[in-house]
Amino acid sequence: MEPKLILILILVISVSVTADYVRPKPRKALHFPWKPKTPSLPQQVHISLSSEKHMRITWITDDEYAPSIVQYGTSPGKYTSITLGGSTSYSYLFYSSGKIHHTVIGPLEHDTIYYYRCGGQGPEFQLKTPPAQFPITFAVAADLGQTGWTKSTLDHIDGCNYDVHLLPGDLSYADYLQRRWDTFGELVQPLASARPWMVTEGNHEQENIPFFKDGFESYNSRWTMPYQESGSPSNLYYSFEVAGVHVVMLGSYAAYDLNSNQYSWLKTDLSRVDRKRTPWLLVLLHVPWYNSNKAHQGEGDRMMETLEPLLYAANVDLVFAGHVHAYERSKRVYNGRSDPCGPIHITIGDGGNREGLATRYNDPQPEWSVFREASFGHGELKIVNSTHAFWSWHRNDDDEPVRSDEVWITSLVGSGCHAGKGHGQRKILMEP
């Protein structure tokens, strides 16, 4: 064999080997050293969308007499408005929370930077309100936890130009150790105080103790979402609208049978969606319905059996889930197989949790599964206009975000699917 040919073959082989992705090693839990804090100063500040043009500001103080006021304006240090909110607290075994403040401010202008201060003292924060219309960008990440990989994911999200963070469950991984809720609040404050974080619950938020403590007490106290504003009886499921997008946050750990409050609320909510006002319809939940990973196989089947017909009748565009610590994207799918009028399902439970990645997949890969990989990362959904959106998933490759999956998505609103579905499929939303 010619020497030049041998050299070429060696180069080709070496390139093919080094091009393969080598998954980095796990990273340890973050350490948060104790630091003395002024009791009346705000801690763990985060914001979330409330009713139209309104934002909920949440923070914690160690001083039970600290006022629940927010001063805000559009210039640094110049506060033209002030709003008084309410507060709550809770006890959990030997732990007592600080005073948890919830104050709704507004009306606010769209796509505007506001400067605000919590409790009448302390540092100044700034937030940016979402736009009134397209384009809008969502950052999506679930199963965050508090590890080195969590920090990497948050750093990458901080580097993207997004408007709203969507988190389909498993936030702090406190798992009964309530101080971890406090450290998680500290960890996410730089991002969560600047852009609205819209979350739903996962299994790690349950924290119930039979005969002693109901589930989700810590989560509900700290992360109040706009459930009342959307007509929901529970903070575990709700909906909101932003810039032409209707977003439904479902509760995988709230009752969802045909006689449940969640089922009744979901039917009502979906039946009221105006696709002229909100051409895009997204759903988030924790336990995935379409999952080819060996982890958590079948856990979402019963919920899917009950609720999938409602989502299909409403022409839902995308469904985001967490729980499985890996990434997977499906084709448009319904009833277990590809369907051009069904939603795309995306599992994104790879935010950085301490339990590690779910690396084993079922083989062969199902026909409906397009892309799957067990790596930590985050997603970005940029909805460009009423018909087109761009989705990308960014793997945490060491400390650099690497775009590893991307696809243009066309909304179902103009696809003819609504007209193509029979009256029998759509009337399920209108039945009592």
Image (spheres, rainbow, N blue to C red):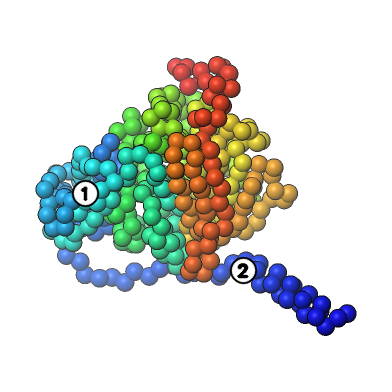
Q: Earlier in the sequence, mark 2 or mark 1?
A: 2
Viewer-nearest residue: 346 or 100: 346
Picture residue at 56% right of the left edge, 17% below the top? 424
- In the displayed structure, 65 sits above or below 306; it is below
- In the displayed structure, 105 sits above or below 171; it is above
Picture residue at 65% right of the left edge, 68% below the top? 19
- Specify whether residue 411 is in view: yes
Instruction: Please state the horizontal and vertical placement of residue 291, each as a whole percent of the image.
Output: 61, 45
Picture residue at 24% right of the left edge, 51% below the top? 113
Residue at label 1? 101
| Label tally | 2
Picture residue at 39% right of the left edge, 45% below the top? 136
The three-letter amino acid code for the residue at tag 2 is: Val
- 258 displayed left or right of 33: right
Viewer-nearest residue: 277 or 221: 277
The three-letter amino acid code for the residue at tag 1 is: His
Residue 22 badge: 2
